[in-house]
Amino acid sequence: MPIFPPIPSAACVAVTINSDDPPFFATTLARDHAETAHAQGWSHADIVAVTRTAPNAAFCDEATRLRLLDRLDRNMSVQSAERSL
């Protein structure tokens, strides 16, 4: 049984993936994303959507939120281009 049960797509809750104290738990945020995607059966698009939730749910000013979303969009564009090679 997975640590966390599947999250139904119709759950209507904001989901984010965070890494609390990575050195202590011997993990990285990328690893947490990959393991969550595998456990939940999520696609790359699902992970991108969940990742976009984080800045939208963060306690930060709008300028910071927009900067983070722009950075995410630029990184996803590069990854998408690399996948198509």
Image (cartoon, rainbow, N blue to C red):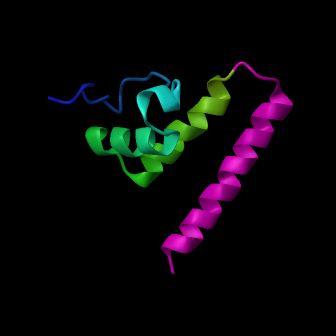
Q: Is residue 52 visible?
A: yes
Does 31 appear above or below 7?
below
In the image, taking residue 65 as reference, residue 56 lies left or right, namely left
Residue 31, picture quadrant? top left
Does 19 appear above or below 39?
above
| Residue at (35, 33) in percent of width and height | 9
Q: Is residue 16 visible?
A: no
Residue 8, picture quadrant? top left
As for residue 76 lying within the magenta part, the answer is yes
Give the percent coordinates (x, y) of residue 45: 46, 51
Residue 82, picture quadrant? bottom right
As for residue 82 lying within the magenta part, the answer is yes
| Residue at (20, 30) in percent of width and height | 2
Give the percent coordinates (x, y) of residue 78: 63, 65
The magenta region covers 59-85
| Residue at (42, 28) in percent of width and height | 25
Furthest residue toward right: 63
Does 32 appear above or below 76?
above
Furthest residue toward bottom: 85
In the image, taking residue 48 as reference, residue 6 lies left or right, namely left
Give the percent coordinates (x, y) of residue 7: 32, 28
| Residue at (82, 28) in percent of width and height | 62
**What secondary structure prevails in the magenta region?**
helix
Give the percent coordinates (x, y) of residue 10: 35, 28
Q: How many numbered marks, from 0 up?
A: 0
In the image, taking residue 18 as reference, residue 65 lies left or right, namely right
Quarter of the image containing the N terminus? top left
Furthest residue toward left: 1
